[in-house]
Amino acid sequence: MKKFNIRKVLDGLTASSSSGTASPQPGTYQNDVIQETLQSEHFQLCKTVRHGFPYQPSSMAFDPVQKILAIGTQSGAVRLFGRAGVECYCQHDSGAAVIQLQFLVNEGALVSALADDSVHLWNLRQKQPAILHTLKFNRERITFCHLPFQSKWLYIGTEKGNIHIVNVESFTLSGYVIMWNKAIELSSKSHPGPVVHISDNPMDEGKILIGFECGTVVLWDLKCKKADYRYNHDEAIHSVAWHHEGKQFTCSHSDGTLTTWNVRVPAKPTITVTPHGKQPKDGKKPEPCKPILKVEYKTTRAGDAFVVMSGGLSYDTGCRRSCLTVMHGKSTAVLEMDYPIVDFLTLCETPYPNDFQEPYAVVVLLEKDLVVIDLEQIGYPIFENPYPLSIHESPVTCVEYFADCPPELIPALYSVGSRQKRQGYSKKEWPISGGNWGQGTLSYPEIIVTGHADGSIKFWDASAIMLQVLYKLKTAKVFEKALKGGKEEKPSTEIVDEDPFAIQTVSWCPESRMLCVAGVSAHVIIYRFSKQEITTEVVQLLEVRMQGELNDVDSPDPADPPTPSTPVPPSSSSPTQEGEPPEAQPFTSDDGPRDNVPCLKVRSAPLKQSPGYQVELVIQLVWVSGEPPQQITSLAVSSSDGLVVFGNSSGLAVVDYLQKSLLLNISTSELYSPSDPYQRQPRSPRKTRQPSGALSDHSDGNNVSEEKSNKSPTSGSTTPANSDDEHKQKRFIEMVKSKSRRFSKTVSNDFAKMSKRISSPTEQKTGLDAKDSSFSRSRSSSVTSIERESREAISSFHFSESFPRKTDSSPSPSLWLGTTQGTVLVLSLSLPPTGDQRLQQPVEVSSCGTLVRLKGGILTMAFLDSLGAVLPPSYEPWSEPNAPDEEKTRRRRPASPPPTQEGQDSQYAVVCSEKQAKVVGLPSQSCFFKHNITESSFVLRADVVQMAAGLCLACFCANGHIMTLSLPSLRPLLDVNYLPLTDMRIARTFCFSNLGQALYLTSPTEIQRITYSQETCDNLQEMMGELFTPLETPEAPNRGFFKGLFGGGAQSLDREDLFGETAAGKASRSLAQHIPGPQGMEGMKGAASGVVGDLARARIALDERGQKLGELEDRTAAMMASADSFSKHAHDMMLKYKDKKWYQL
């Protein structure tokens, strides 16, 4: 039996796209009519910025002088945050998890330790940080790192219990090593375990505290190379915290206890407490609690110290959430968190460990959030987070990107969104305030719209590579909440496993501010924007009965395994014209089929609608003879026509939202005229059909439809053994191609399952929440999968003032629709005059047949005028819908005038499918240009975009290629192999926008923005913010006269004498390998940070040297004054006893 050659399959999917040139077609087009201005030099592809919460965070660090926060992730990423709008993304090439981060405080550098036992030095003095040095350990596993303040020697603890020392300037190992067998007692017979903590004594740099996992703590004397004291405890240690005077330290243990030790009393701890343990009355030990994972002890001058810790709750505690405990004096506050705590840091006023810390805030890194707590206000309120970290508040299900929006739109959305802000935040400014904003010149309004699984829609201001939430709309408010106890109503709403309000697609007109939303429960909601609050007594509802015909289904291949299915009832002979089903057909009992029942129940009580988007009309598809409605696959709204159109695998429906009526409800096959050359029974493009399964993205989570997907002949173990490799490859590729429809914004779940199977087990990310990646689309879609796939569904719509017929002499309103089998059909719209007649007379819709046919499903359509300029869909300018009637009628204007210029009656239709692009002249309907975009792959997303220098067609293929084609000649301008399709999320969320912008959801919590514009790439450095700012290090704490004279203050240590090559020798070459940074001299030049940085550093160094000289001068003066005093006293004594005899003394 031959094995399935996955490599060939991947080669077939990732093969480079076709670079065939566009071929002119017969027609009357003249090459010199339209001058194309876009050239290849106008394009360049690069990443711009990444927004959102760092996915799967693992570590955190803070620079108290620069006030910069760094977060490392399990995928090797490092996100740096400063003030609002100052963010940066870095990535380690290895992709190993970041286990620890350490700032070189106020030096513009960061040390990262990874799970692959490598240590990296990042230069932060340039806008895009780069790695200067890497040290890869070969024989030992790194477990903990510590870099003392203002030191160039990094302590690295290992799993074997040893401690190595690295010079961060040269990134070379010192010959000085602290071996575990010398640190512990010689009488100990067991290994102490990995090093879990390293820190130096705040008052004596020559003493470091080493914590071993077993519970042993050692105070090591660096000069004498021996252990001064050893502190033994029965329970394992998780963390250690010093008192700033260096006389005591506190340990947190696995049994929920805190032990405080006196440095000079190693026999037993001075204090042992169980903060959350129940104290027995008989004097016994308190019951053990959950481990205290981390503890920090911070002192204040004026009051009690703060003890902050994570974990330690009692096992009996009913609260299952993670908690942060803040103990201050006699008060103990337990702060519940929404997600598990990854790490926390206490922010203090001083960077010096030997001074009173004066804590003012706690930064808490959670698995899916970042919280900063104010310690200086009563009740410990949190700070309002200025970063766009709430993208994943509910899993993102769809994304749309709008660049160069109307300038008044962002202020309008912000004004209504500002009323939605929560109250109770801290009144202080955000404490992470480092860095400076960029000085970019490219600034135009950009808006990102995200749809979520809970039915919410968020509008984001994305201008100038920043991101800020403007407004949040909750679509679920329109519907009744499902009663969990109701058994009879529950089946009617179960066409999805969960998240019945999830957003599937969005159609938004920024100019008119009309918003149309389609959800997974086969519902469409139309919204108008208003600045006034209203109360809607009854939500307008329109129920639509859409069904396909039985004869437009291919019979299954006899070789295919039988799939349980429910027969699809035949549709009526004529399109349904009634907007609402007859009341005589209510919901039937469970014994009979459900019929004319919507999936969700619209709210019956009055609905209070705040300023912002307010419901105009709700459209719901109903069950048909026991069959659930098919989910909506495409959607479009036209404000100038007052129409909304949506389609699915059953057909399409046109709704007049001004008259609240259904104009057309027709199956796809009925759109073809009898004389249409393309008229046929729609058939599946392949003979072997697979069950579609639930259209969900589970590439990084648990697949809830695993059992269904395994029924597919291509899903691994169920593959027939006698099939050869090539046959399997073809079936697999065809399956992927057939499911790459634009309407679903995803490839299929089967492809996701195959991606999981062909990836190695070590590369699979486990334990992720499947809800993060997507939502379950439909439970019923796999029941009748063969019938559903074979139907010709509607994949795209476009409203336009164009020429629907060859005989037309002037443009008229029309609706252009594309299907999943490559056909472009046209509907002519006859609108009554504006005003009262528009609200009373019906809109007439008539079919004009087929325009053109392409390979693959239609993705996008656009129209150009005779000069090659894009013709945007006509729209009605926005006006306040809740204004008085007389004002409303006065302000309502007809649709924008015909887009064609006088004396010119020709246009060009640009149509792009999954395989091809064509340019068709109108009204002649002659094909002027055709370009085969790809042969071996397929296009996932295509859009006609306006660049600064012209117009182009942008495409993103499943093999990772991003391409642009000139218009109208379809000449290739850009073809870059950017991002192979390794994640279904990318296919579902990738979108282009004007002026060379694009984005996609790179993880469940992050949006990656890219640009394919040369102009934006050239200005990117200026637009990016700066992380490092030259600042003076705060003054060291004053030690006082007596401490300076007699000692007792902080003891300094010349580490160079101890760790340098002269004293310690060279380290073993086999222990670690030094790897220079990839940027070489460029990175070193960046580290210099120019003449200004050098001068600033020199000035700071001179100040520090002057400060030390001043301290020395003060000490010398004090010694001279003491000597003079002693000399005076001695002289007085001499004079007093000079003339006395010995017996007179």
Image: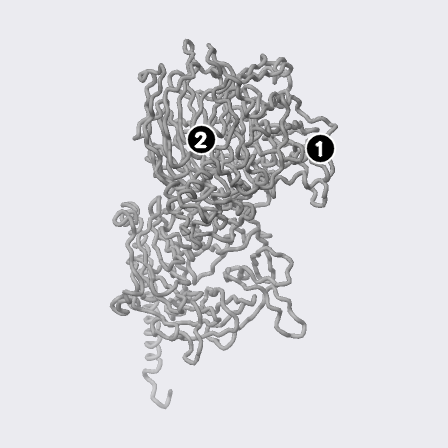
Label 1 crowd (10 A; few <14 / some 14-19 / many >=20): few
Q: Is residue 1056 above or below residue 981?
A: below
Above or below, comparing residue 117 to residue 122 in the picture: below
Choose mark 1 or mark 2, whichever is in front. Answer: 2
Residue neighbourhood size for the residue with mark 2, other residues' Cα within 10 Å, grouped as few (<14), some (14–19), many (≥20): many
Q: Nearer the viewer, residue 306 or 684?
A: 684
Which element carries disc 1, helix, strand or loop? loop
The residue located at (47%, 16%) in the rendering is 802
x, y percent for residue 770:
54, 47
**Outermost residue to the bottom:** 1143
Spatial CA span between label 1 and label 2:
44 Å
Q: Residue at x 42, y 69 (%)?
A: 210
What sort of colour scheme is used for the picture? one colour
Q: Which quarter of the figure is the C terminus placed in?
A: bottom left
Q: Is residue 371 among what the camera can see? A: no
- What residue is pinned by disc 1? 604
Give the residue type that dot 2 points to: Gly
| Residue 821 is at least partly visible in this image | yes
Residue situated in front as seen by the camera: 389 or 974: 974
Quarter assignment of residue 1070? bottom left
Q: Is residue 767 above or below residue 582?
A: below
78 or 1121: nearer the eye? 78
Closer to the chain start, of discs 1 and 2, is 1
Instruction: Return the x and y of residue 967 as percentages of the image width and height.
Output: 37, 24
* Res. 856 mark: 2
Task: Locate residue 674, reporting x and y percent.
Answer: 53, 18
Name the secondary structure under disc 2. Answer: loop
Q: Is residue 99 left or right of residue 1131?
A: right
Which x, y percent locates residue 641? 55, 19
Mark 1 is on which residue type?
Ser
